[in-house]
Image (tube, rainbow, N blue to C red):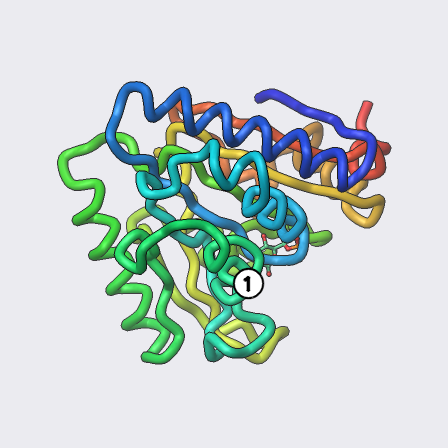
């Protein structure tokens, strides 16, 4: 695991935008297309806004990138809580990508059916390959959740399905999420975490005992791929 500590959230987004851009260019020297899983939540917004602007809007070969989501809140696309809407508003509406490059988790159909359809799309996209995504970008909630793997939920331990949906009573909504097995087969996983509200959780996730029921982010352990944590000083402040 590689830890990258930035001064503050703005510096973290700058560093990560440059890092992602270099990584995409490097990977695309050896293969025709790049698969990129976007995270939802508030942390990646500044990063997406940066990637949509110079120099990244011209350096990155957007037409060779396919976009996926790590998880989705099963609310209409127009709802401000929708993770895909946030990514369109900040990034995808501003760079030259075609609709066929964007694999949204549908929220206008039954969530369980949406998860099943997404899993089929992934199986088709990665058929015959032992690795899945080239890059998975993840956030971590203050409670240690990542994707929609929340503390104390069964989905944290899902071993077979690549995508699943479940009712989250605390938020009064369905969640659709990739599971740990499909993410752990990625070539590269990057977590972002900022702010002192995440400091103790970050310490426990990285330095504490393995207890994924309490800290689901610990289930993200790549099998052969890279794992990076991009954090700011506030989030890192409780670590040894
Ligand atoms: O609900 C979610 O939260 C996490 C963390 O979000 P943040 O606001 O603390 O950055 C996010 O990674 C996930 O995609 C989202 O659905």
Whether residue 163 sits left or right of residue 10 in the image: it is: left
Q: Quadrant of ligand 1?
A: bottom right
For image coordinates 43% across by 54% down, the residue present is 69
For image coordinates 57% across by 38% down, the residue present is 218
The extreme left residue here reads 128
Residue 94, given in percent of the width and then of the height, sits at: 50, 55
Relative height, residue 60 to residue 172 (above, below) = above
Whether residue 15 sits left or right of residue 240 in the image: it is: left
The quarter of the rendered structure image containing the N terminus is top right
Residue 133, given in percent of the width and then of the height, sits at: 35, 37
For image coordinates 45% across by 52% down, the residue present is 70
**Closer-to-camera residue (92/157):** 92
Look at the image and tell me whether residue 182 can be seen.
Answer: no
Q: Secondary structure at mark 1?
A: helix
Q: Which residue is mark 1?
A: 89
The quarter of the rendered structure image containing the C terminus is top right
Whether residue 83 sits left or right of residue 107 in the image: it is: right
Classify 10 Å Cα crowding around label 1: few (below 14), some (14-19), many (20 and above).
few
Residue 12, given in percent of the width and then of the height, sits at: 71, 35
């Amino acid at each position: 695991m590689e830890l990258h500590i930035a001064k503050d959230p703005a510096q973290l987004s700058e560093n990560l935008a440059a890092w992602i851009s270099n990584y995409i260019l490097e990977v695309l020297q050896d293969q025709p297309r790049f698969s990129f899983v976007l995270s939802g939540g508030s942390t990646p917004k500044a990063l997406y806004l940066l990637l949509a602007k110079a120099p990244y809007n011209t350096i990155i070969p957007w037409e060779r990138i396919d976009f996926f989501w790590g998880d989705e809140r099963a609310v209409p696309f127009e709802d401000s809580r929708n993770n895909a809407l946030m990514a369109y508003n900040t990034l995808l509406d501003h760079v030259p990508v075609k609709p066929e490059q964007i694999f949204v988790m549908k929220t206008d159909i039954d969530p369980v059916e949406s998860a099943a359809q997404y899993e089929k799309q992934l199986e088709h996209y990665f058929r015959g390959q032992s690795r899945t995504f080239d890059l998975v970008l993840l956030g971590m909630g203050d409670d240690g959740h990542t994707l929609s793997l929340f503390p104390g939920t069964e989905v944290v331990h899902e071993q077979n399905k690549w995508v699943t949906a479940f009712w989250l009573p605390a938020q009064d909504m369905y969640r659709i999420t990739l599971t740990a097995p499909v993410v752990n087969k990625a070539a590269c996983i990057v977590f972002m975490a900022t702010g002192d509200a995440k400091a103790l959780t970050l310490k426990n996730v990285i330095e504490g005992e393995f207890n994924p029921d309490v800290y689901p982010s610990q289930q993200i352990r790549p099998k052969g791929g890279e794992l990076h944590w991009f954090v700011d000083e506030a989030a890192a402040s409780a670590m040894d």
